[in-house]
């Protein structure tokens, strides 16, 4: 399939720059995955589409304040480093800006030496493997020196960094938020549980792939970057029970979807496991795990548009996106949501 088949026209004015005051007051476009029928609603009413016995799966990853501004030790030149994925020990895959002049052996300093980063390997497209040196606990140093790494299409400064975290964020390690979950409040989650809907948690740390566009015309040639995931025994047991009782599993976000489908692909059932996934879901993919998904509106020609198209159809999804544009929905990370079911 050609990448152009997943393009759509989006006025820049519809790219949400700030979150709404109330998380669950965003709009919700509900789409029947089989017929493509659309219903316009609001996110606080998403509970109306759940049934007792359903299981809602949330990604509890927490975004690190992983954007650091520092200096190249040898020259004093300014540099920006975005930490993406912990490789092993204190070695991290990062994006550097500017990257051209950072070679193996070069050192960067942040916070007057509170963090030192040494380049140990050069990667493509501004990527590097950096070895970090610091005293104490890295998370504390990042809390002190780092900034939240908002996507490049968000130009406004975020007054409250917690608005780029889900209310249930727990496991630190992401370079970006699982944004479909930003719409939930503690109160809404309580109401969902009271209806008899199960809530389960998995973890997938969002990494490099989020920041890189598809650069090939034929999507079969695209290579996904690996991201770390884990599932507990309690979650695996609950999901297997949900399937056995013929209830639905509804994933919140493409990150939850990729994790669930990876585990079902590799094990034919849900198991307690962890590892790295580079699963690429696009039309033709056979879903084994999920029966519905909540997702935001994604960038044109992105792997995420391909994923939701695979769950329904490309025609249905692009028609839904055209309707959302006509109805002035808000797009991308701080934008409105879709429920495909």
Image (cartoon, rainbow, N blue to C red):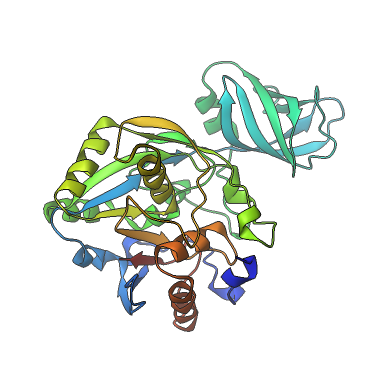
Q: Residue furthest bottom?
A: 326
Please state if 160 lies on the left or on the right of 198 as rendered: right
| Closer to the camera in the image, 256 or 111 | 256
Q: Quadrant of residue 115?
A: top right
What is the x, y in percent for residue 195? 12, 56
| Closer to the camera in the image, 156 or 94 | 94
Q: Is residue 314 placed above or below 197 in the rendered structure?
A: below
Image quadrant occupied by the N terminus: bottom right
Q: Quadrant of residue 39?
A: bottom left
Q: Residue furthest top?
A: 135
What is the x, y in percent for residue 45? 24, 67
Please state if 326 lies on the left or on the right of 37 as rendered: right
| Closer to the camera in the image, 330 or 305 | 305
Q: Is residue 332 placed above or below 68 in the rendered structure?
A: below
Residue beneath the point at 51% across and 43% down: 206
Residue beneath the point at 87% across and 29% down: 75
Q: Quadrant of residue 114?
A: top right
Residue beneath the point at 58% across and 27% down: 87
């Amino acid at each position: 399939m050609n990448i152009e088949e997943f393009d759509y026209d989006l006025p820049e004015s519809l790219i949400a720059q700030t979150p709404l005051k109330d998380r669950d007051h965003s709009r919700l476009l509900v789409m029947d995955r089989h017929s493509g029928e659309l219903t316009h609603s609001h996110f606080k009413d998403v509970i109306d589409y759940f049934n007792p016995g359903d299981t809602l799966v949330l990604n509890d990853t927490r975004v690190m304040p992983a954007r650091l501004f520092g200096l190249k030790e040898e020259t004093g030149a300014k540099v920006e480093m975005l930490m993406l994925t912990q490789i092993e020990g204190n070695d991290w895959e990062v994006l550097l800006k500017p990257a051209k002049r950072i070679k193996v052996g070069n050192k960067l300093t942040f916070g007057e030496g509170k963090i030192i980063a040494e380049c140990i390997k050069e990667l493509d497209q501004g990527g590097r493997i950096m070895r970090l040196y610091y005293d104490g606990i890295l998370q504390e140093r990042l809390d002190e020196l780092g900034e939240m790494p908002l996507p490049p299409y968000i130009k406004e400064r975020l007054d409250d960094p917690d608005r780029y975290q889900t209310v249930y964020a727990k496991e630190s390690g992401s370079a970006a938020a699982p944004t479909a979950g930003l719409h939930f409040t503690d109160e809404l989650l309580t109401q969902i549980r009271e209806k008899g809907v199960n809530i389960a948690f998995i973890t997938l740390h969002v990494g490099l792939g989020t920041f890189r566009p598809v650069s090939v015309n034929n999507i079969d040639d695209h290579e996904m970057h690996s991201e770390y995931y884990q599932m507990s025994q309690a979650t695996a047991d609950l999901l297997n029970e949900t399937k056995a009782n013929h209830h639905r599993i509804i994933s919140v976000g493409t990150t939850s979807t990729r994790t669930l489908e990876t585990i079902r692909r590799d094990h034919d059932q849900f198991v307690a496991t962890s590892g790295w996934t580079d699963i690429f879901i696009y039309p033709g993919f056979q879903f084994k795990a999920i029966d519905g998904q909540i997702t935001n509106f994604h960038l044109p020609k992105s792997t995420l548009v391909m994923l939701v198209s695979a769950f329904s159809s490309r025609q249905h999804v692009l028609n839904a996106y055209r309707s959302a544009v006509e109805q002035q929905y808000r797009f991308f990370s701080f934008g409105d949501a879709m429920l495909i079911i």
